[in-house]
Image (cartoon, rainbow, N blue to C red):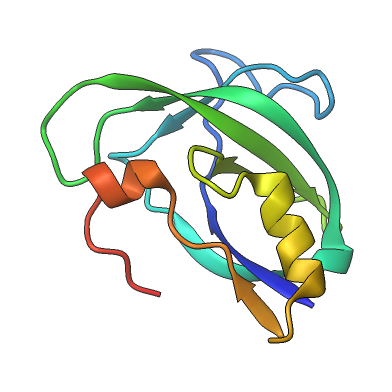
Amino acid sequence: MFIKLELWDEQPPIGGTLPRFGVSADAYVNTRASDPRYLPINLASLMSFESIEVTAVGRPGSSENRADPLRGVRVLLADGSRYIVFDDKDPVFERGLAAARQAKELVYDYGASRFMREHGLPVIP
């Protein structure tokens, strides 16, 4: 079973390193400098996740220099990679995981975040 997620790379704080997983430290994502990836993730490879506060810096496709506070989830995958998922819509991330486990289709599409639907470029599935 898979869940298709909008994954963002986390940027370390200025002059710092990424926080240890599990400390629920706030995350920063430069949404103008990087693009999300929409990838199917095997539910068995999702090792852990934690709820966090995310500051989305900039807005995609715009020259606006805004910082948007968002609710998010930091996910840790079996290969050691970690990503940020914006958890700003309904269903929330945990309900999306439950729906993916019960889905009849092989890949459950969790969909784009509300932030990207409102401020982003058109989403290419």
| Frontmost residue, 94 versus 56 | 94
Q: Going by the picture, which residue comes out furthest to the left?
A: 63
| Frontmost residue, 87 versus 16 | 87
Quadrant for the C terminus in the image = bottom left
Left or right of 120 in this view: 93 = right
| Frontmost residue, 3 versus 55 | 3
Does 45 sit above or below residue 59? below
Q: Kindly identify the residue that appears in the image at 80 percent across and 24 percent down.
A: 20
Q: Kindly identify the residue that appears in the image at 54 percent across and 16 percent down.
A: 13
Q: Position of residue 47 (x, y in %)?
A: 88, 51
Does 56 sit above or below residue 112? above
Left or right of 55 in this view: 31 = left
Count of labels shown? 0
Q: Quadrant of residue 42?
A: bottom right
Q: Going by the picture, which residue comes out furthest to the bottom?
A: 105
Does 120 sit above or below residue 112? above
Left or right of 13 in this view: 82 = right
| Frontmost residue, 80 versus 68 | 68
Q: Position of residue 109 (x, y in %)?
A: 56, 71
Quadrant for the N terminus in the image = bottom right
The reply to whether residue 83 is in sight is no
Q: Kindly identify the residue that appears in the image at 35 percent across and 22 percent down.
A: 68
Q: Quadrant of residue 62?
A: top left
The reply to whether residue 65 is in sight is yes
Q: Position of residue 10 (x, y in %)?
A: 56, 36
Q: Kindly identify the residue that appears in the image at 64 percent across and 74 percent down.
A: 108
